[in-house]
Amino acid sequence: MLKKIQQIAREFLKQTENKKVQIVSHYDTDGICSAAIMAKAMQSLDKNFSVKIIKQLEKEAIEDLPKNSVLVFLDLASGSLKHINQLKNQVYIIDHHEIDKNEKISENVHIINPYLHDEDNLCGAALTYLFVKEINAENKKLANLAVVGMVGDMHDQNIGKIGNSIINDAEMKVKKGLLLYPATRPLNKTLEFSSSIFIPGVTGSSTGAISLLKDAGIEKKEGAYKSLIELNEDEMSKLVTAIVLKRTKRDTEKFIGNIYLIKIFNKLEDAREISAMINACSRLEHSDVALALCMGSKEARKKAERIYADYKQHIISGLNFVSSIEKIQGRDYIIINAKDNIKDTVIGTIASILSMSAVYREGTAIITMAWNNDKIKISGRIAGRNGRNIREILDSVVEKTGGESGGHPLAAGCLISRAKEEEFIELLRKKLEIELVKI
Ligand SMILES: [Mn+2]
């Protein structure tokens, strides 16, 4: 694959000599980091370029792209070859999503995708980084952004050879420990505000956080608690024990791993925190701020921090709302219809938090719904790590109601028309009940 990247990078340089470059990328952390890496590389080449960040690549969006530019799709487009093949532009796709197997690849379309090479699944930002490093070895300084992308796409716990070489390129420190973030702030605050690990009685509670630290035998030093990365091994293991005791025991291994501290704005920062900040900006419709943050704007950094605080507030009020409303509940499932009370871009995160929260029994199917204009965004999760295939369940319902669906066995989603709301719930209930009988 590295050979192929080298070859495509050379081709790209030739074709963009006198042409404008249009970058199109996905709005999640990986996509934003990919776009920032590419934009930085284009800046250093003095190229004329522009960036478009999108939530989904739709047919209309593809048709609207400028006809005279060289198009670069990052972290998306592998599933849209049908439409992309219609384009006359020179097209570059750097992506890690599954490729349409039924589609041929047109001559003007150049693809870098691990699927074509039986390669480890590297995220979009990692692939984009490898690409720009071929363009100019000086782009090595962009490795930090590739690491943020890896963390954002959760490719950071099972890293292959190429992934490790990128980590070696980055200015960073790696430490094993609890995947609570930010790992760089006082622990009582990290525990209180963490949404990555839900700890009953501690998450969202300042007194709960302090009492947990007391249980763990971690004392204040000079009036403040240490941060996670300042803990020694003994303190770290005491803290893990205290948290495990507060939770059901099922997933200890899931929240211990590598903490990545990357150098950004001349300071070591927790890559998970930066990733969460980027994600928050995008989900609250400020992907421009997220991109500027990744490109190094101090002003964007300040704005992003405010948006991130606002986002956490959205999540907390969303969780409160969910706990206050009536839900459709069966033995092994729960359907939560938030209607227009929770943003469609936040509802998936809420479903994820509920699935990790130990509120519901392992294997429970959690389905959340939120309106998005005339559509409904549905997110399905399975509590814990084992259970039914939620992707198949949603797919089979959407087959009847119409709409789009996608995802994985433990986390999937779909988008349906609002006119189908009642029908969807009815069909879904039936499906969940029948599935239960089969088991
Ligand atoms: Mn990605």
Image: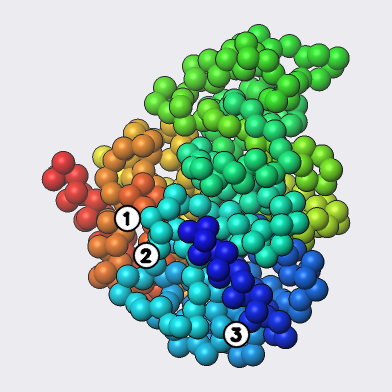
Mark before the other along the chain sequence, 1 or 2: 1
Q: Secondary structure at mark 2?
A: strand
Left or right, 133 with respect to 186, comes to: left
Residue 376 against residue 237 in the figure, above or below: below
User: Going 50% across and 64% down the picture, which residue do you hit?
Assistant: 4
Quadrant in the rendering for residue 97 = bottom left
Q: Which of the labelled discs sits on residue 391, or is there none?
A: 1
Between 189 and 61, the residue placed more toward the observer is: 61
Direction from residue 140 to residue 420 in the image, left or right? left
Q: Earlier in the sequence, mark 3 or mark 1?
A: 3
Q: Is residue 50 visible?
A: yes
Q: Say few, some or many: other residues with alpha carbon within 10 Å of mark 1 (under 14 / 14 to 19 / 20 or more).
A: many
Viewer-side residue, 272 vs 68: 68
Q: Amino acid at mark 3?
A: Leu
**Residue 59's spot in the image, x, y percent?**
47, 82
- Tell me if I can see residue 182 in this picture: no
Q: Are the residues tagged 3 and 1 within 8 Å (C-beta)?
A: no
Instruction: Identify the residue under disc 3.
Output: 65
Q: Quick one: label 3, few (<14), some, or many (20+) residues within 10 Å?
A: some
Q: Quadrant of the C terminus?
A: top left
The x, y position of residue 58, in whole percent, is 49, 77
Determine which residue is flagged by label 2: 405
Report helix, strand or loop for mark 3.
Answer: loop
